[in-house]
Image (tube, rainbow, N blue to C red):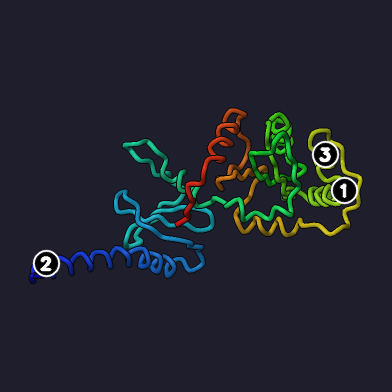
């Protein structure tokens, strides 16, 4: 038989749960009132110093329940595990599920069995992209989806369109990146360049090269060959599930 005491305890737990559920919504509402133009995707409480994590626009910041302060650009480190909590969350927040990529708008390059997959957003005038392409030429059993992502100059756009309009896109791209041979095709065919740019900009891809691995993790810039190989192995494991909330 339920007693008044047990009912009171149950009521307390219910109230606490309701309050916890409401806190992130209250923090979000308070921030929107103070910063109406700020992009806010999600708010959640984190187990560190009564902080709330706020994600938006591909960034992470921290505040308290009263939104009396903001920690912008800071790194939250777990003192016990030495884990960079902010960095880990940034990887989750900015992850792009591989099956959401518009692969029909990419140049597909297969080496060996092609069992391992990556997608790369590259600008044809990007020096680091050319260096990466040279290193990737030695990576076995790899399928690459190259997204032409001209963000450096109008000439980048022209070259990207010429590559896409070439009879053999793969050859045109590799000749350009590995041999500095400019494509000879016209740039007037139907092409997905604007579509790819819109996709990347919506997902805050602001640098080239940007690599997307099979597990959704992305890396902007270069990786050392051994780091790249390690990441390939990790990414090919069964998906653990990625959440940005």
- Residue at the disc numbered 2: 6
- Residue at the disc numbered 1: 166
Contact (Cβ within 8 Å) of mark 3 with mark 2: no
- Helix, strand or loop status at disc 2: helix
Q: Residues within 10 Å of mark 3 (few under 14, many from 20)?
A: some
Which of the marked residues, 3 or 2, is nearer the chain's N terminus?
Answer: 2
Please state the horizontal and vertical placement of residue 177, each as a whole percent of the image. 79, 37
Please state the horizontal and vertical placement of residue 218, each as a whole percent of the image. 58, 45
Q: Residues within 10 Å of mark 1 (few under 14, many from 20)?
A: some
- Helix, strand or loop status at disc 3: helix
Q: Residues within 10 Å of mark 2 (few under 14, many from 20)?
A: few
228 sits left or right of 60 in the view? right
Residue 111 visible in this rendered orientation of the protein: yes
Please state the horizontal and vertical placement of residue 120, each as a whole percent of the image. 67, 44
Contact (Cβ within 8 Å) of mark 2 with mark 1: no
The CA distance from mark 3 to mark 1 is 12 Å
Which residue is at a point 74% across and 59% down the rendered structure image? Answer: 194
- Residue at the disc numbered 3: 176
Tag on residue 203?
none
The CA distance from mark 3 to mark 2 is 74 Å
65 sits left or right of 242 in the view? left
């Amino acid at each position: 038989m339920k007693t008044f005491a047990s009912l009171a305890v149950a009521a307390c737990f219910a109230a606490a749960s309701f309050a916890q559920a409401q806190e992130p919504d209250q923090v979000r509402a308070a921030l929107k009132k103070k910063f109406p133009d700020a992009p806010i995707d999600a708010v959640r409480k984190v187990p560190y110093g009564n902080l709330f994590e706020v994600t938006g626009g591909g960034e992470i910041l921290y505040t308290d329940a009263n939104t009396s302060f903001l920690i912008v650009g800071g790194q939250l480190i777990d003192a016990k595990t030495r884990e960079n909590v902010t960095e880990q969350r940034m990887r989750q927040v900015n992850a792009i599920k591989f099956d959401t990529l518009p692969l029909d708008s990419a140049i597909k390059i297969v080496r060996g069995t092609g069992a391992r997959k990556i997608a790369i957003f590259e600008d044809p005038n990007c020096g680091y992209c050319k260096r990466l392409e040279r290193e990737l030429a030695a990576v076995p059993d790899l399928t690459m989806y190259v997204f032409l992502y001209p963000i450096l100059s109008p000439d980048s756009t022209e070259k990207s369109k010429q590559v896409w309009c070439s009879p053999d896109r793969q050859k045109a791209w590799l000749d350009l990146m590995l041999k500095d041979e400019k494509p000879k095709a016209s740039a007037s065919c139907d092409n997905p360049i604007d579509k790819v740019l819109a996709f990347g900009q919506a997902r805050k891809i602001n640098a080239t090269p940007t690599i997307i691995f099979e597990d959704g993790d992305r890396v902007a810039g270069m990786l050392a060959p051994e780091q790249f190989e390690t990441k390939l192995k990790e990414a090919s494991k069964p998906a653990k599930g990625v959440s940005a909330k």
